[in-house]
Image: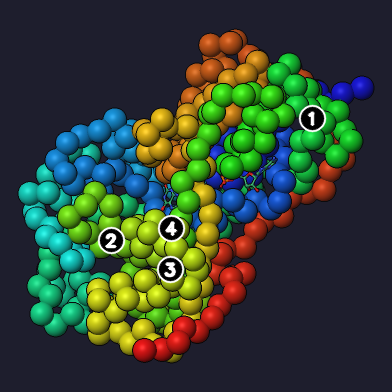
Amino acid sequence: MALEYDMIIFGGGVAGLWLCNTLKRAGYNVILIEKDKLGAGQTLASQGMIHGGQKYVLQGAMTHHAASLAKMPERWESSFEGWGEIDLTGVEFLSEHQVMWPAGGILSDVAVLGAAKLVNADTKKLKRPDFPEVLQLKKKFKGPVYQLPEKVLEVRSLIQSLAKHLKGRLFQGEATELLPDGQVAVSGLVMRAQLVIFTAGTGNERALELLKVKDRHAQRRPLRQIMVKPVPYALYAHGIVGSPKPRLTVTAHPTGAPNEYVWYLGGAVAEEGAKMDDAAALAFAKKELSEIFPDIDWNGKEWATWYGDRAEPFDAAGDMPPGPHVHQRGRVLMAWPTKLTFAPALSDRVFDWLKDKDIHPVAKSPAPPLPTAGIASYPWEVAEWRRLEDA
Ligand SMILES: Cc1cc2nc3c(=O)[nH]c(=O)nc-3n(C[C@H](O)[C@H](O)[C@H](O)COP(=O)(O)OP(=O)(O)OC[C@H]3O[C@@H](n4cnc5c(N)ncnc54)[C@H](O)[C@@H]3O)c2cc1C
């Protein structure tokens, strides 16, 4: 006898956890099955920024992607305040804002405040005493520094808050067989659902494989994020140059010692780093940091990397897709948020689909006899730290 559920979700990153909450709230008998640990894929490796789209329209033209992102901060905010679709009052923030500053290029009021207008963001130009401390070290640097109303999450507290509402529904396991009619095998158990949903990041490719789908529906865009510690400054910022991509995006994560942070670097430094080996990427990052922050001694620090993929729906040009995407095969959906920020929008896509197909709660099976899924670690908690040869 197969265990029957309304929905079985595979993948416990932000997308699966968000969706599991909204489906549960709508009365569906839904369970989530995670291969490893909750947050283990891209989610805990992300920089936790709730984007409002501004950094994508600095060139002055509005895009569909930015317009969709612009709706997201308010959506998240309602949940952080406790009156939105999921109670996320337990989420902690590393910062209430991000800043943008010119890291080697020119950044003008026209570009930044014009972009803020396009996405309707309350962006402010800061006076020097209000610059983040590390930017005040640059004695000749007069700015500009802009403050964006985009929060930076302590991502583990997000996972914990999403998981808190899902007691008895989060399991560890992996699908070994999958049929388009909604039947799956997990650890020898046969299950069936009105809808099987893969929010498994790079693992969505496995679903396509099990379904024997031949054409290409998924892509990966690799990054080599750089980690360096200890740094005595908190910074949540995009260092902008002429290109649409920031030269570096910095988030700072407390090490536990007073005023000590791991700096976690994304942006061009991580995209370029993905084309190099580990040692070359670290040497490049050190050079970039020495140029951008010459007042900090980058010798004697500890360094590490996180190499991984952004798991996305296929784009013929290999570019960033415009937003969340759902691909359907029978009773199986493969879903990609493409950004942590888009998790609520991905859930909307699935609900549109349920409405369209007129799917209502019916299934009655109890929880499957599978182990409960735990929560994964941040990359910097499990990284192999090393010292570079100082020069
Ligand atoms: C370095 C980096 C920085 C980023 N920074 C930001 C940011 O600041 N802001 C932002 O909005 N977005 C950011 N993103 C994008 C964002 O992290 C992702 O879009 C988002 O986390 C994807 O969530 P997900 O739940 O779809 O996938 P994931 O977080 O990858 O979760 C997939 C889960 O599925 C599990 N899994 C895999 N295969 C299977 C299987 N066969 N069965 C069951 N489970 C399986 C994995 O173990 C994993 O836990 C960043 C991405 C990266 C890589």
147 in relation to 263, above or below = above
Q: Is 141 situated left or right of 199 in this image?
A: left
190 in relation to 295, above or below = above
Residue 32, quarter of the rendered image? top right
Amino acid at dot 4: Lys
Amino acid at dot 3: Ala
> How far is mark 3 from mark 1, CA to CA?
39 Å
* Image marks 3 and 2: residues in contact by CB distance under 8 Å: no
According to the image, label 4 marks what residue? 275
Amino acid at dot 1: Glu
> How far is mark 3 from mark 4, CA to CA?
8 Å
Q: Residue 177 carries which label?
A: 1
Nearer to us of marks 4 and 1 is 4
291 in relation to 266, above or below = below
> How far is mark 3 from mark 2, CA to CA?
14 Å
The mark nearer the N terminus, 3 or 2, is 2
Residue 233 at what x, y percent from top left?
35, 78
